[in-house]
Image: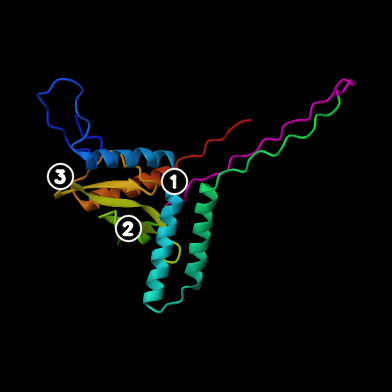
Amino acid sequence: MKCTGCGQPLEAGSKRGRPARYHNAACRQRARRARVATRHGDVLAAVAAVEAAAAEVRHAVLTDGNADQITHQLTRATAEVARLVTPAPAAEAAEPLAPAVTKPVTEAKPRTSRSPRSTRSAPLDLDTVRLERSSDSTRTGWRVLAGATDAPVVVGFLEPVLSVTGRRSSRWEAQTASMARVHGGPWRNQMDALARLVDDYQRAASRPRRHTIT
């Protein structure tokens, strides 16, 4: 049986009762973050875009570069986060009831179907895929970016797997931009984890859209 948090095998215990699912509190917390990420994937992806834009602005300021265009990108990304986390407005007060209609209704107004908004990402340009150390103090690994430098796409994250004692091992795990673990990990080295992360992104981007009939 493997640990739900880090994916490493659990030692068979001699105690009776419910078997352990985690190595320690850190693994339990990591598994909880993964569960939360699956429920709030859109918000976390938007936050990752803000972090990427903020890092570009910081770099432009420190190098005396032109931060105007990058600042606009940060503004748009921040507005998207605000849109996602702002609660929907309360329903308007109900209008007064109209008098009862005695005339029979002979025609029904047809329903207008709305086409669902597509959130599918475009496939990556593999020549632009690059690694950047995470600026988040809570993450010890690398961010995987792609696309233009002024508006990068956050593909996901690579993190070294920690042993039960907290030491860094040679194996790596990959997470999407929405903090969901890529199936099949951890992998034996960083490049294997990177290849699986990019492949997972490309498969999702190339998957045919589903058309809803209403």
Q: Secondary structure at mark 1?
A: helix
Amino acid type of the residue that numbered disc 2 sits on in the rendered structure: Asp
Q: Nearer the viewer, mark 1 or mark 3?
A: 3
Residue 6 in sight: no
Front residue of 212/99: it is: 99
Q: Secondary structure at mark 3?
A: loop
Q: Secondary structure at mark 2?
A: loop
Amino acid type of the residue that numbered disc 3 sits on in the rendered structure: Ser
- Residue at the spot of label 3: 163
Quarter holding residue 13: top left
Amino acid type of the residue that numbered disc 1 sits on in the rendered structure: Ala
Quarter holding residue 150: bottom left
Earlier-in-chain disc, 3 versus 2? 2
How far apart are labels 3 and 2 at the CA level?
A: 21 Å
The answer to whether 68 appears left or right of 145 in the picture is right
- Residue at the spot of label 2: 136
The verdict on residue 20 being magenta is no
Q: Which region of the structure is painted magenta? A: 100-123
- Residue at the spot of label 1: 205
> For the view shown, which residue lies furthest in the bottom direction?
64
Question: Magenta part mainly helix, strand or loop?
Answer: loop
- Judge the density around disc 3: few (<14), some (14-19), many (≥20) Cα neighbours within 10 Å: some
